[in-house]
Amino acid sequence: MGEKHISSLGITETKYLYFKNELGLESGEQLSNITLAYETYGILNAEKSNAILVLHALTGDAHAAGYHQNEDTPGWWDLMIGPGKAFDTDKYFVVCSNVIGGCKGSTGPSSANPKTGSPYGLDFPIIGIKDMVNAQHHLIRGLGIKQLLCVAGGSMGGMQALQWVASYPEMVKSAIPIATTVRHSPQQIAFNEVGRQAIMADPNWSEGHYYSSSPPTRGLAVARMIGHITYMSDISMADKFGRNIREEKSDKKFSPDFEVEGYLEYRGDNFVKRFDANSYLYITKALDKFDLAQGGSLEKVFRQAPGVRFLVIAFKSDWLYPAYQSREIVKACKQAQLDVSYYEINSTYGHDAFLLEGTEQEHFIGNFLKRTYNEQK
Amino acid sequence: MNKNNELFKPDHKVIFEMIPAGSSVLDLGCGNGELLNLLNTRKNTRGSGIEVDEQAVRQCAALGVSVSQQDIENGLADYGDKSFDFVILNESLQQVVKLEWVLKETFRVGKRVIVGFPNFAYYRSRLQMFFSGKTPVTRSLPNMWYDTPNLHFLSIADFIAYCHSRKLTIEKAVFLDGARRVKLCPNFFAQNGIFLLRNGNDFSNGEKKPV
């Protein structure tokens, strides 16, 4: 992050799909009047056989590649998406979809409740990864795509990719789940819970009804700080900050002394400008409740998807989504006799590696897609 | 045929010939995926590999060979019973820690097993040992004693005796001295042995099971 990549995609823009029909949710509730934000790169071929769906992580958005007008940071996966890159937009039609429950242009708790005209707040129903995928299914069908060449994503994006395989196996030719899991461990749930508690402990949160007053920025910033710690590794933090002391001095006794403290504060403060606290609650809950096999056997889930080819990627220094969770996916693929490749990339970036690690990931993803695309021709 | 000879490493050629078209194949310690690629492209096999080396798995990806980057012990345990027509253990048997366990697992996972290894009783090894009194270094065992990846040193005679004791049926055995096939006294003249095995009797420790 921070490094500016020369993107040959140029200016890209977010589009919106609106659909009126009700979406039945995992919770049993209904959601209607849904807007879903998405972006597309490249051209859908005449046979509509070159479409790839890319899915983002917890706080990501539809803007995966290229630059928005008047902005100087590219999309979150610009490293991987573009002409000649792993997701080669000269060859493939790449769609990146946002998620419902979020706050980046898709319907979520900060959207207007059609019944009242004011933001949903906590009246927004609890949503799951499966619901996000069902909403995306409307988008993909709406784009006239019957089968995706690939669904890919890291972290929560990987969960969505896995859910796509489970929910719509006939629509998926291949899947690339990266640095992800089929279900959260107690440790992962615990970190999310601390984040949620920080938000809810902020007096400004007011049971989620803060849209006409001050939002719980303090709580959300702390949640983000905790998140950031878990996305990095011991080594990446040591490399980046060491025990360096900040230049800015303050008279206050417990103001941040070390650079790492200042960095976390900066990250937290920046985050509250672009993210909604209630969305953070809803989406982390969706992550924690996700269980691809729903308590059953993962092998059985994959047996329902006999034609799907997998590329599973984990990173050695990722302690938030440790490699053993990826190997669990690989094991189930093998037992279900699916074609699977697995790589454990030697990165020091921690969980963030899926956003930052260029060369290796590009090599594995690029070759995997090439093979999958050529074989179907 | 000549074209094949240029493309194929001698041991790969032997293994290639042992596997019928359309088979499912697992190559343990598949290296850069060369053999699997030959099998997949020329014999239409469904092949996948297990390989732990970083550079090697990169090459597998470039060839379009499916590979799991993990050690043989862990990667093998994931598979269900009789998942493959053939499991290959070429030049990797002598490097695994839990050799007996791995061999047993290959017979659980595969219907047939192909094992290839360097022959420690090759005559040049014997001569080196006899005259210099030093651990032999040959083309098939090219490392010095202090930097060899090999954990087990075995001869063709050792392995044949082992197969008998474990009731493993040797369906075919090919012995090589470089690219040349050795028929006479292979334990003396061959640098490599390649065996096609079938489990005759549930891999018991020599105990006969009632049929």
Image (cartoon, coloured by chain):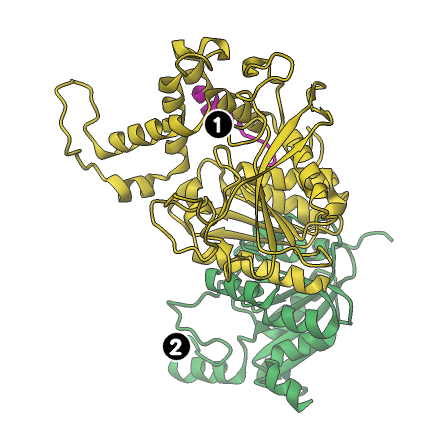
Chain colours: A yellow, B green
Instruction: Looking at the picture, tell me which residue is in the foreground, A39 or A261.
Output: A39
Q: Amino acid at mark 1?
A: Gln
- The relative height of residue A62 versus residue A40 in the rendered view (above or below) is above
Which residue range is magenta in the image? A182-195
Q: Nearer the viewer, mark 1 or mark 2?
A: 1
Instruction: Say yes or no: labels 1 and 2 on the same chain.
Output: no
* Image quadrant where residue B118 sits: bottom right
Image quadrant holding the C terminus of chain A, namely bottom right
Q: Residue furthest bottom?
A: B2
**Which residue was labeled with disc 1?**
A187
* Image quadrant where residue B110 sits: bottom right
Q: Amino acid at mark 2?
A: Lys
Residue A156 x %, y %: 54, 36
Residue B44 x %, y %: 74, 69
Q: On residue A289, which mark appears?
A: none
Residue A364 x %, y %: 53, 58
Image quadrant holding the N terminus of chain A, namely top left
**Which residue was labeled with disc 2?**
B134
Mark 1 residue element: helix
